[in-house]
Image (cartoon, helix red, strand yellow):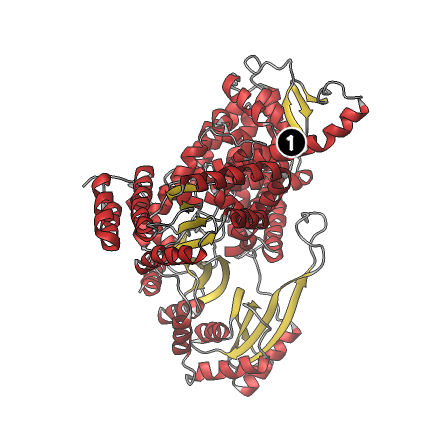
Amino acid sequence: MTSTDMRTEAEDSGPSGYAAARLRLLQGEAQSGPPRRTALAELTDDWLTGLFDAGSEALRGVSLVAVGGYGRGELSPRSDLDLLLLHDGSDSGAVAALADRIWYPVWDLGLALDHSVRTPAEARKTSSEDLKVQLGLLDARHIAGDLGLTAGLRTTVLADWRNQAPKRLPELQELCAERAERQGELQYLLEPDLKEARGGLRDATALRAVAASWLADAPREGLTDARRRLLDVRDALHLTTGRATDRLALQEQDQVAAELGLLDADTLLRQVYEAARVVSYASDVTWREVGRVLRSRAVRPRLRAMLGGGAKPAAERSPLAEGVVEQDGEVVLARAARPERDPVLPLRAAAAAAQSGLPLSLHAVRRMAAAARPLPTPWPAEAREQLVTLLGSGRPTIEVWEALEAEGLITRLLPDWERVRCRPQRNAVHIWTVDRHLIETAVRASELARRVGRPDLLLVASLLHDIGKGWPGDHSVAGEIIARDVAARIGFDRTDVAVLATLVRHHLLLIDTATRRDLEDPATVRSVAEAVGSQGTLELLHALTEADALATGPAAWSSWRGSLVTDLVKRVAAVLAGDAPEEPEAAAPTAEQERLAIESFRTGGPVLSLRAQTEPVDSETASASVSEDPEPLGVELLIAVPDQPGVLPAVAGVLAMHRLTVRTAGLRALDLPDGVEGSVLLLDWRVAAEYGSLPQAARLRADLVRALDGSLDIAGRLAERDAAYPRRRGTIAPPARVTVAPAASRHATVIEVRAHDAPGLLHRIGRAFEEANVRVRSMHVSTLGSNAVDAFYVTGSKGSPLPGEEAASVARGLEEMLRG
């Protein structure tokens, strides 16, 4: 059935005919995208026209007008119908009756309706008071009734909008900024609002309104396609969910991708991000132009008066670099610039813009994109220096980089950038796409540049450290290969290429080792020293580690993590300087530990103490983002308990019940003094409260006593709490993974657990180790978002590392338990 047949059926059969025709249109596969939206709008027009004509036989001076999205002729499957019943005020009673005859059938079909009944004067007055109403009327479209009435309103509203533009456009810009603050940036969100987030459909509509003012216009290349893509995604979202929603939730992304014929949810998000980036960039350029025009209008009358009404003065141009000048608050090309003869010009202009904190003009970027010659391989020294200058310019680098990327200049300079461009990161810790994270890392690294001897290598490594994402396998391994190629192409010598490759290959080494390995174990420190190779590379890797973590998100860096990394770096530096680490000896117990051990033996039960731990930040290595005040690193929990089975799961379970997060944990057996037979287990853990204040030590001890004697059902209590946790519908955590780290320690076997963080995870792991007759010597826990990555140093019952087969068997059993 054609769209014309559907409209005829809708006209002939009333609401039920419209509903049936609408359903067939939405379920049919022949039309999608703009043709379906247009067909749905036309079908609805015809149905509403029938309702209007049936109720307005002798009524004159009335028209039915579509506004907003419906006014633009774009109806998504669950879009509201935005309608205005316009009348001349001659018969308000008859108009009210007509409104009921139109509104009620719409409501009866369950369609969302945004309606109003006004005279032209009332509509004009309301739009002058309410910016959102005025924006909706800019898209007013006649459906039925008095065409002259509708045309008159359109003419008046457009005239008012253009006359009021100097006042209204700043209001609209502020409205867009407030919405962006609330909703975030569409191009980076894992669950974006397609309409309200910055770069979404609301911003695209705002750009139409700016163009209608005749004051400024948006860059049009790609904008129509970007808007169409966002509308297509919203259509698919409405169809798959059956709801009027604009939020692309995680659990619906695979279905939406399938509806659009895309490979997977990542492909879907990447297309959404690319569209949002086009809209965001167009918005930036447009609002900058609006500001420039408004400023010039405000200044021009005064200048003309000063010049006696003479000719318009030439805009002032200040030189910034060869071929680059500043004009009207933007960086533009000098009149003598020849991009077709100067391949370094794009990088020189970008570096000058970032250094001066000014935006690159749209015209300049487009001219360079159209005419600039490709750089030779390897790059000349000036090109490499300008890239480093751009990366080292701090926060202004981001806007300049986005301008180059919008016109395709970045992928022309760095072809490998294409794989990371707009690539989503499905990790709660990361707040940016891969490409934006790389630029954020460079910005953070620029703040640390004075800590290293080769800031150029630090900045380029920051730009490339995740360049391997998007390739199969370990992104650090793939990234090392790409980094070697890119660094050589940029013009670094062989020594620098090797350093950059090492930094990319091992950019996670310090943070992973510091948070998951025993730093007292010489094997740990020696392995890092061997991987790094030199003091200079270690210095660079330390700064890169901090910049990478700070650019990832709030959960990736803290004073605690920073202190662990700094400790590791100092130990590795000592090894690289020729000081071999000594084999660790069991430290003599402190007076506090001895006191607790004796009291535990005397009472026959657990004894514990809680003490806050703080550590001042090293002023020589502190970045600007970290306070120099002492910061709490957690609370030291000392527990002494007579040696017996089940201590680890009991303690971990009690801490989980009291909502305490374990950061580090050590266990050791203390022989009692004065020849007393027997031993006491000493647990030295650092913990932190998930929220609220710490529980009293007496309460912890009481629960621990009950846990050890079996009267406290920890597993049951934790299961109840876990069942009460809200879960996002449709989300499934990836299965746990347990591995044995090869040659990680001479004194213990290191078993690494990666699992979804949940209450009682350590309790369950502890029980599994107990059942396998494995003793935990120490453990290092790390939680990033919803992911726990914990390393356990374990031994057999006699205190020696586990044989290879036994270690593998323990790991397999633990993995099966966690997956079960």
502 versus 66 height, above or below: above
Q: Quadrant of the N terminus?
A: top left
Q: Residue furthest left?
A: 1
The residue tagged with tag 1: helix, strand or loop? helix
Q: Quadrant of the C terminus?
A: bottom left
Closer-to-camera residue (732/221): 221
Horizontally, residue 619 falls left or right of residue 194, namely right
Closer-to-camera residue (250/41): 41
Q: Quadrant of residue 355?
A: top right
Position of residue 135 measured from the top left corner of the image (x, y, whole percent) = 51, 44
Which residue lies at the image location 56% right of the left edge and 55% below the top edge? 519
Is residue 474 at all visible to an observer of this figure? no
Is residue 390 at all visible to an observer of this figure? yes
Query: What kind of residue is marked 1?
Result: Val
Closer-to-camera residue (219/476): 219
Task: Find disc 1 in the rendering and name its residue.
Answer: 293
Horizontally, residue 129 falls left or right of residue 40, namely right
Horizontally, residue 389 falls left or right of residue 232, namely right
